[in-house]
Amino acid sequence: MRLRLGKRYGGLAHGFGCACHTPAVLEINRRIVAGLDRRSVLKGIAASFAAVSLGQSGAFAQTPGKPLLFSNVRIFDGRQGSLVQGSGVLVVDNKIEALVPAAETVADADVIDCGGRVLMPGLIDSHWHTMLAGIPELVAMTADVPYVHLVAAQQAEATLLRGFTTVRDVGGPSFSVKRAIDEGRFPGPRIFPAGAMISQTSGHGDFRFRYEVPRGSGNDITHAEAAGISAIADGVPEVLRRVREQLMLGASQIKIMVGGGVSSAYDPIDTMQFLPEEIRAAVDAAADWGTYVCAHVYTSDGVNRAIDNGVKCIEHGQLADEDTVRKMADTGTWWSIQPFLADEDSNPKSDPVQRQQQEEIAVGTVRAFELGQKHKVKMAWGTDILFNPRGTPGQGRQLAKLSRWFDNAEILRMATGHSGDLLAMSGARSPYRGKLGVIEQGAFADLLVVEGNPLEDIDLVADPGTNFRIIVKDGRIHKDTLRG
């Protein structure tokens, strides 16, 4: 059988994208010019090239311009509940070219013998905050905006090395970080950005302190608004303006706040936010651009108002009753839900009222997963790690917690193929033209080689440093501890 390999990528040329132009190597040059002693320089070189090996220039024996063939693998394809055996996966450029019979060879391909390990799609976190996950709330709301971006860039690489090759960002100014990742300037996951969280005055995205009320004038915006974290809008014209601004900046979906939350100080969870006509305005503006609105909300009343006015995805919803969950199923509304269990992975809160709210939501979380499963709601999984730098390493651990409600195959589908279906709702506003979360011909080559079988032991995803032996994003190897 002769395989058509398609167009190959051009390799790594000297210049942009070359290792000698990375910050790590530029730091080596700076040290040399500064006249540091030879021993310090050698230490710097070793440390810097170790950093390069984890970044965008680390190819791990990946030959530029050649296809990659992952052989001797058992495949979880993001859909089926069992492993596909007897095939290898051929990657050309940044996509999967074919599933190749095991007995077949591919001329001129770099072959990676995976030793019978499991090959699966890269993980997808459907509720992530690129800019806000790895930084405390007070710092995010007061620091210089460039500092927030630098912390986010650092966290982006860590996210990728945890096996999350794609995130749906549902709040924060991630456009510039996304662009730099897509251009290969530093490593990180694919980002589906929502941009600023759109909130009413006093809503979940109104991060003002009490002394900042009232606004001084129409041009007196808060630090959070100036940074692009949130956008306050009251009335249909303002909602239309703020939604359209985020679409102009490159939003793949729009995030609005329809109810109260825990991380904001002045909007109790039971509050209803945005009038029906305001929600409808956001939905119509997004639909005009071929995409959809997702809504932060916990309560039944808020979920119903959101669905009745065209919202396509509910973020959280842990306090919804059974009739509301049934309505989500009947209307085909997506449920992006997180394992909020008031445990060691909870976003830290010192205020007793916020801690009490976390406990209330934890009780609702158990019931929500049970009801969602019972009524077969379209469910996607996310973490919503927020203002919690200590919590980011537990990203995979939060996925493993779903074993309380689902079998391992369904858990993996929720973080791969199902989440890929949710991302596809962005339509023409999707930043990436190709399938995500699956291993099939034409899908993006975002792949993990796993030590062990996650269909048998889902806890493997909780320790990516040990168990994800190879991490590939966009056809490029970012980690390889299998071959050295």
Image: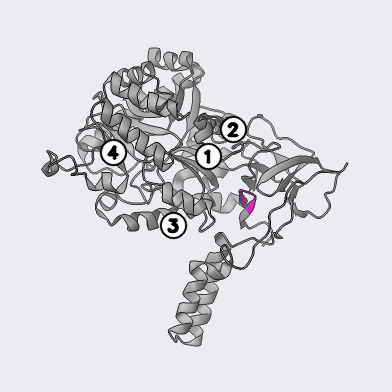
Question: Which quadrant is home to the C terminus?
Answer: bottom right
Q: Amino acid at mark 4?
A: Ala
SS at mark 2 in the image: helix
| Residue matched to label 2 | 417
Residue with the mark numbered 3: 154
Task: Report if residue 417 is visible in the image.
Answer: yes
**Closer to us: mark 3 or mark 4?**
4
- Alpha-carbon span between mark 2 and mark 1: 9 Å
Q: How dense is the environment of label 4, judged by Cα within 10 Å: few (below 14), some, or many (20 and up)?
A: many
Q: Which residue is mark 4?
A: 231
**Callout 3: SS:** helix
Q: Position of residue 23 (x, y in %)?
A: 48, 67
Q: Position of residue 205 (x, y in %)?
A: 27, 37
Q: Which of the two discs, 2 and 4, sits closer to the camera?
A: 4
In the visual, does 49 lie left or right of 219? right
Left or right: 89 as drawn, with respect to 170: right
| Chain part drawn in magenta | 471-476
- Which three-letter amino acid code belongs to the residue tagged 3? Gln
Q: Position of residue 29 (x, y in %)?
A: 49, 78
